[in-house]
């Protein structure tokens, strides 16, 4: 019984971790290459979810909606870059935090203005609805497995892109020493745009993928943004590999911790206190974990810069 | 001692003669406001709005102490508002309703939290410091949501405002206004003393060049930690007042968005001038309060349907206003006032 539950929670944790990775990947690159704190990255996730909700209501087909949503999310990210973020690259972190905070305020209200405050539901695509039996008597929704597969595929694609292509080489070089890359004659402005647009599209993709299993609502990106920051700080800013490992770790710790903290505490405390303390401690686990990592490794587990 | 300190700082940066006007006007206006409020016909509303301005001014001032003078971007400062608020709420629900008990407990709890988290956070620099303070803020937020005995997510309604030495005078809005005013003024004077003292100059030195401070024999970490603790305790006091003003306390006191708003207030007013933070808090809250009205008036030529949609979605204007302020009003409001800056 507990083993089955543990397996289900581990799969949920993996799925959550991969979604976090999709968001954190863009964030860590933007952070690492441009030294730019983008609080508005979370709303790009929200925009992705809303776009797929709107397009799937319009076309009636999730796959088609996803195909339409991705370029739209990309275009939207580039629009924000040209309009606002470009003017903030040479400002200090404080100004970046505040201006992108303004973007969050605007966009959270804008989606309310366009789609209303009530949560939207996106139906799970027909072919992926239902559950399959993974092991004896253990049913798991197919769509969640699809998310896991898609997340792993994107992670692999990203790995190849970053470690095997010329653009990836520039991105890695940029994360290590942007001044030198610029001095070597690379159009850093264009590199920034590519990285930024790509990051926005990944966040939008994450939002689109979870739209069928979560409710699409204003402010849905705010909390996941903080988790994505936790991920990139633990992983080491600018490191894709660090972001991947940290995202999986955070996904597992959070999901498994929430369902098992009360059980574990039961060994030490009486049941009523254990379940209450467990519920209190579980959401704090990842932040405690982050504080511990930063205490011992102040620049994360896999820092890209020296 | 302080006189010598003043003379020395004066020899480095000659202060403009008009500096002291801004705080004088500010506190003067806050002092006479209740008398004008009585004439306005909406006394309760005006007093409660101005109390909020003073309380958030106090919180922003506490943040300015470490942000403006120490360049420590704490993105979890709302946690201290929460600690102060919950100290009031939890003590009151156990029958201890006197502010003379609640305030020391709130200060001790905020100070302790600041000491622990500061010790860990101050090991990191720059972006990592922003993120780790954010993480601690979130930790406390989730702790508050799980306090089922004290309302959990929904929060806790206070039975009434705190007693003061056994009397119920704080229930009177005018007295409560006065109490907030005295707290703000007291903390402001204290903070002014702190930044002009030797301690304050070491703190500023550590902001400019920590390596050099270390080379001449100071340990920046200790000074920064003490400043962080003092700042946290001041924000804790603001939390006590905020809980009393709202007669309610909930985890929403310490969302990360609230921390972001506090930073915004400080930057809006102008970093590193203390009274600037109060002006920034006032500007932020008044803008938030009156932007819907302003939009209503400004859109008179639109149809009433469009007008009401615009007013309802005033945050769609508020967000871009914030962005434009960051992009174009460098140095904050104090940077616009002649002689408003002095650091």
Image (spheres, rainbow, N blue to C red):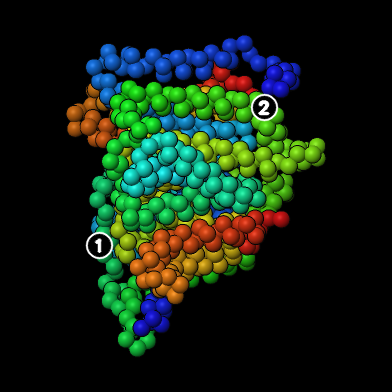
Q: Is there CB contact under 8 Å for labels 2 and 1?
A: no
The reply to the same-chain question for discs 2 and 1 is: no
Q: Residue at (43%, 35%) from the top-left corner?
A: B100
- A253 sits to left or right of B126: left
- Depicted B49 relative to depicted A112: above or below: above
- Give the CA separation, mark 2 to mark 1: 68 Å
Mark 1 secondary-structure assignment:
loop
Q: Give the vertical position of A4 relative to A88 (above or below).
A: below
Callout 2: 10 Å neighbours few (<14), some, many (20+)? some
**Residue A219: x and y, percent?**
36, 49
Indicate the position of residue A300 as horizontal and vertical percent values: 62, 59
Marking on residue A4: none
Q: Residue furthest bottom?
A: A136
What residue do we see at 32% from left, 13% from top? B36
Q: Nearer the viewer, residue A160 or B116?
A: B116
Q: Is residue B313 visible?
A: yes
Q: Which mark is residue A60?
A: 1
Quarter of the figure that contains the N terminus of chain A = bottom left
Tell me the element at label 2. loop
Q: How many marks?
A: 2
- Which residue position is annotated with label 2? B197
Callout 1: residue from which chain? A
Whole-percent x, y for residue B151 in the image? 31, 51
The picture places residue B322, in percent across and down from the top left corner, at 44, 33
Outermost residue, top side: B17
- Identify the residue shown where x is 36% and y is 43%: B96
């Amino acid at each position: 019984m507990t083993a089955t539950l543990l397996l289900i929670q581990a799969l949920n944790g993996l799925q959550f971790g991969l979604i976090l990775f999709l968001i954190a990947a863009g964030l860590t690159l933007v952070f690492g290459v441009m030294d730019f704190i983008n609080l508005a990255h979370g709303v790009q996730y929200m925009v992705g979810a809303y776009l797929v909700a709107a397009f799937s209501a319009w076309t009636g087909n999730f796959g088609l909606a996803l195909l339409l949503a991705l370029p739209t999310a990309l275009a939207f990210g580039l629009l924000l870059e040209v309009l606002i973020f470009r003017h903030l690259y040479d400002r200090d972190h404080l100004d970046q935090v505040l201006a992108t905070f303004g973007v969050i305020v605007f966009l959270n209200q804008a989606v309310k203005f366009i789609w209303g405050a009530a949560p939207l539901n996106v139906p799970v695509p027909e072919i992926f609805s239902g559950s399959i039996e993974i092991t004896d008597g253990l049913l798991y929704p197919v769509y969640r497995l699809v998310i896991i597969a898609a997340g792993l595929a994107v992670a692999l694609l990203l790995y190849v892109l970053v470690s095997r292509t010329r653009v990836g080489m520039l991105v890695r070089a940029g994360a290590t020493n942007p001044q030198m890359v610029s001095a070597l004659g690379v159009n850093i402005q264009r590199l920034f745009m590519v990285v930024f647009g790509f990051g926005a599209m990944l966040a939008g993709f994450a939002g689109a993928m979870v739209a069928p299993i979560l409710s699409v609502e204003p402010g849905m990106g705010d909390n996941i943004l903080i988790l994505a920051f936790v991920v990139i700080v633990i992983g080491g800013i600018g490191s894709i590999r660090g972001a991947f490992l940290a995202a999986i770790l955070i996904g597992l710790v959070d999901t498994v911790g929430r369902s098992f903290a009360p059980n574990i505490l039961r060994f030490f405390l009486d049941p009523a206190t254990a379940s209450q303390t467990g519920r209190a401690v579980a959401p704090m686990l990842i932040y405690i974990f982050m504080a511990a990592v930063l205490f011992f490794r102040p620049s994360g587990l896999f820092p890209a810069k020296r | 001692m302080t006189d010598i300190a003043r003379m020395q700082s004066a020899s480095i940066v000659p202060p403009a003669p008009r500096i002291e006007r801004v705080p004088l006007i500010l506190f003067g206006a806050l002092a006479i406001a209740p008398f004008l409020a009585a004439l306005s016909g909406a006394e309760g509303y005006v007093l409660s709005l101005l109390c909020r301005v003073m309380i958030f001014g106090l919180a922003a001032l506490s943040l300015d102490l470490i942000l403006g003078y120490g360049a420590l971007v704490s993105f979890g400062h709302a946690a201290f508002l929460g600690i102060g608020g919950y100290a009031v709420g939890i003590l009151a629900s156990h029958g201890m309703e006197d502010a003379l008990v609640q305030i020391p407990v709130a200060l001790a709890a905020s100070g302790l939290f600041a000491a622990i988290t500061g010790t860990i956070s101050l090991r990191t620099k720059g972006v990592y410091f922003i993120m780790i303070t954010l993480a601690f803020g979130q930790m406390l937020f989730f702790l508050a949501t799980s306090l089922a005995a004290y309302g959990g997510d929904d929060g806790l309604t206070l039975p009434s405002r705190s007693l003061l030495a056994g009397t119920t005078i704080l229930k009177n809005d005018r007295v409560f206004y006065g109490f907030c005013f005295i707290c703000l003024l007291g903390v402001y004077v204290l903070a002014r003393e702190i930044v002009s003292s030797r301690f304050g100059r070491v703190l500023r030195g550590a902001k400019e060049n920590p390596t050099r401070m270390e080379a001449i024999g100071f340990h920046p970490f200790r000074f920064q930690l003490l400043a962080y603790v003092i700042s946290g305790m001041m924000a804790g006091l603001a939390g006590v007042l905020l809980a009393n003003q709202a007669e309610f306390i909930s985890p929403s006191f310490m969302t990360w968005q609230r921390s972001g708003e506090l930073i915004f207030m400080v930057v809006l007013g102008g970093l590193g001038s203390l009274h600037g933070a109060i002006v920034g808090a006032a500007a932020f809250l008044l803008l938030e309060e009156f932007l819907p009205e302003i939009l209503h008036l400004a859109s008179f030529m639109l149809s009433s349907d469009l007008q009401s949609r615009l007013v309802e979605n005033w945050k769609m204007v508020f967000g871009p206003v914030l962005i434009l302020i960051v992009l174009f009003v460098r140095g904050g409001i104090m940077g616009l006032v002649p002689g408003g800056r002095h650091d």
